[in-house]
Each structure stands twice: as structure tokens, then as C-alpha cells.
Image: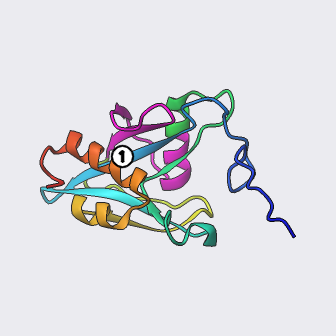
């Protein structure tokens, strides 16, 4: 029996995806905790994401008619329960936008959706080691360099 093709016009939960770039946004949330830079990463609970896409910054697809800024704000609120000022960051490119969000030291995270089951605040080195695939790791490294030059080295 032939394998069914994945529907790339819808998200994992059936919502429509914009068909023009940028297709979505990643939000690199960072804080200074006891003078140490920490990054927020989320663990995806779906079995389809258990391997390569298991840990990533908050991110998601842009819906048709939605601005990329609105997409980033929605994804951060849906996935981490946070509303923070967003700053566009270099490193995403046309297909996927990357934003920076500075969280207060005591920032709490609320996993509001069934997509994620865990979160962690990690050092830049730990976040880069945990996140994948390479495209996510590269975007994260560029964002870290913008936040704290030299922190990835």
C-alpha cells in the first residue's frame, strides 16, 4: 500500500499554514538568572517529534492572513503562556522568521497546549546541544550571538 503524503498545508493539529513566506516564526526567549544567560526550550510531546524536533525554542507556523509579528506573539503565548516584547533577529531567512524576547529573571512558563510536555531554561551551550535539527541549531546560535557575542564559543 503506498504511503500517504504528509499534508504540508496544515499544522500537526489541523490548522492551515500560510503558503507564502515567511511560513512561521521561532522565538528565542532569554533571561539573565543570577547573571547567567539562560534560554527557554520546549519539549514536543507528540511521538512524531520525539527525535529530531524534540527540543526547540517556542515556534510555529503562520496562519493564512496572519502577519509574522502576530504569528510570533501568538506562538509564544500558546506555547509558553508568555507575552513579551519581540525583536526581529537576523538568522531566520525568508522561509522562517526568528525573534528575540527578553524575559524577566523570575519568568514563569505555562505550557498551555498539548504540543509540549516539558520546558527548560538552559545555558547557551546546553540549549545548542539539546536543540535540533541543524537549521534550528543554526538559528539559535545566530540569535545567541546577537544577545551575547561570544557566548556560543
Left or right, 109 with reference to 127: right
Q: Quadrant of the C terminus?
A: bottom left
Q: Nearer the viewer, residue 47 or 37?
A: 47
| Residue 84: % across, % down | 39, 40
Q: Residue at position x 30%, y 66% from top?
A: 129
Q: Nearer the viewer, residue 131 or 57?
A: 131
Determine if the magenta segment contains residue 99. yes
> Where does residue 9 sit, x and y in percent of width and height?
72, 43
Q: How many marks?
A: 1
* Image quarter of residue 20: top right
> Which residue is at a point 72% across and 47% down the rendered structure image?
10
Q: Nearer the viewer, residue 116 or 1?
A: 1
> Does the magenta run of residues contain 81?
yes
Q: Quadrant of the N terminus?
A: bottom right
Q: Residue 102, located in which quarter of the rendered image?
A: top left
Rendering coords of residue 88 (x, y %): 37, 31
Horizontal relation, residue 68 to residue 63: left or right: left
Tell me where residue 38 sits by quadrant: bottom left
Residue drawn 54% across the image and 32% down it: 22
Q: Residue at x 70, y 47 (%)?
A: 8
Looking at the rendering, the stretch of residues picked out in magenta corresponds to: 73-102
Q: Which residue is mark 1?
A: 139
Q: Name the residue at the right extreme.
A: 1
Judge left or right: residue 138 versus residue 64: left
> Could you tell me which secondary element the residue under label 1 belongs to?
helix
Give residue 142's position: percent from left, percent from top.
Answer: 28, 43
> Please, which colouring scheme is shown?
rainbow
Binning the other alpha carbons within 10 Å of mark 1 as few (below 14), some (14 to 19) or many (20 upward) gives many
Amino acid at each position: 500500500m503506498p504511503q500517504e503524503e504528509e499534508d504540508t498545508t496544515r499544522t500537526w493539529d489541523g490548522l492551515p499554514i500560510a503558503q507564502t513566506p515567511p511560513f512561521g516564526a521561532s522565538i528565542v526567549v532569554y533571561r539573565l538568572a543570577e547573571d547567567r544567560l539562560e534560554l527557554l526550550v520546549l519539549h514536543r510531546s507528540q511521538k512524531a517529534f520525539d527525535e529530531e524536533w524534540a527540543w526547540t525554542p517556542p515556534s510555529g507556523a503562520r496562519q493564512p492572513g496572519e502577519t509574522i509579528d502576530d504569528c510570533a506573539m501568538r506562538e509564544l503565548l500558546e506555547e509558553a503562556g508568555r507575552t513579551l516584547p519581540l525583536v526581529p533577529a537576523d538568522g531566520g531567512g525568508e522561509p522562517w522568521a526568528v525573534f528575540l524576547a527578553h524575559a524577566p529573571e523570575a519568568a514563569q512558563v505555562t505550557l498551555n497546549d498539548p504540543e509540549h510536555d516539558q520546558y527548560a531554561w538552559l545555558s547557551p551551550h546546553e540549549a545548542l546541544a539539546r536543540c535540533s535539527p541543524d537549521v534550528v541549531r543554526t538559528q539559535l546560535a545566530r540569535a545567541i550571538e546577537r544577545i551575547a557575542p561570544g557566548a556560543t564559543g
